[in-house]
Amino acid sequence: MVKIGVIGYGYWGPNLVRNFNNKNFSRVTLISDLSEQKLLKARATHDVETTNDFNTLINSEQVDAVVIATPVFSHFELGMAALNAGKHVLLEKPMASTSEECRLLIAKAEEKGLCLMVDHTFLYTGAVQKLKDLVKSGELGKLQYLDSTRINLGLLQPDINVLWDLAPHDLSILIHLFDEDPVSVQASGISHTSNGIENIAYMTVNYASDFIAHFNCSWTSPVKIRQMLVGGDNKMAVFNDMEPTEKIKVYDTGFEVKSDEDKRNILVDYRVGDIHIPKIEMKEALAGLAKDFCDSIIDPTRTPKSSSALGISVVKMLEAADTSLKEGGKAVNLFK
């Protein structure tokens, strides 16, 4: 049994505690939060010890691994303290505020021989696993594009823009599905508040091949949309996370461009076929992530699905997007 300490019992913390309180592989032994009211709730709900001092939790002999569910600006300090104390670490997404902070955390984990993982929960959903199967099996053919929309009338964050808040979900899915490394990022957005933090933003990830990925993120939409299109040269898939059961639809749809003596003419044959709705395994994704983390602690030779390498890749793209926003949508090279 892996003994887990959880720092942060706010929005996401209770879900983490519930899933790590698993009789098969882990149990939560200590919870830390600055709010006494939240700690009172934690004690009543889980019958667990609590503290308002994260150092007490990090240095406790009753903790093997630390799960950090706090704002991103605190991830580096807390993560580094836990690693220095010899604890395995799971960080809420995004991994840290900068890629340099991510790099230092990864180096410390490797130095100490500890597991460092990031909570990109969507990778453990049945829908994303089905998308991965469709890509891996070649059913979609050669991938051509990924187009994501994640919008809602949501909570405007005081410290990060909408891309840092919403895009990590879909960027992690992009990295999980498509093996090629991106070459550049472009972003545009706007702030409708006095703090200058973008509440609507669009992000494009460019590749050396003919693949492209685009992300639409907004906190100011009258409707909540969670939709991703993944197009191949054979079939196309739609992932609609708002659907209760039929989250994935595969369209036997495509097009073929024919050659013509007159190069100014484009001859296109369109194919519209059947729609297939594959069965999706309905399970709690966070339970899969919790098990992956604990399995990776027990077996240091395995690489978790939501690894620190994936985590730093997401942050690098978000950093590049920030630079592009400041430079009027200029393409920012990811390999400087």
Image (tube, rainbow, N blue to C red):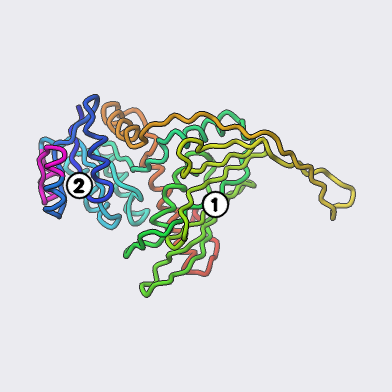
Judge whether 225 appears above or below 290 on screen: below
Q: From the viewer's side, name the closer residue of 219 and 184.
A: 219
Residue at x 27% of width, y 52% of height: 75
Residue at x 33% of width, y 28% of height: 301
Q: Position of residue 137 (x, y in %)?
A: 57, 28
Instruction: Tell me the SS state at disc 1.
Output: loop
Distance from label 1 to label 2 (Cα)? 36 Å
Q: Is residue 92 visible?
A: yes
Q: Nearer the viewer, mark 1 or mark 2?
A: 2
Q: Amino acid at mark 1?
A: Val
The magenta stretch spans which residues? Answer: 42-60
Judge whether 283 appears above or below 72 on screen: above
Q: Which mark is residue 7?
A: 2
Q: Amino acid at mark 2?
A: Ile
**Few, some or many C-alpha atoms within 10 Å of disc 2 (few <14, some 14-19, many ≥20)?**
many
Kindly identify which residue carries mark 1. Answer: 183
Judge whether 294 appears above or below 55 on screen: above
Q: In this rendering, would 278 be left or right of 258?
A: left
Residue at x 32% of width, y 40% of height: 117
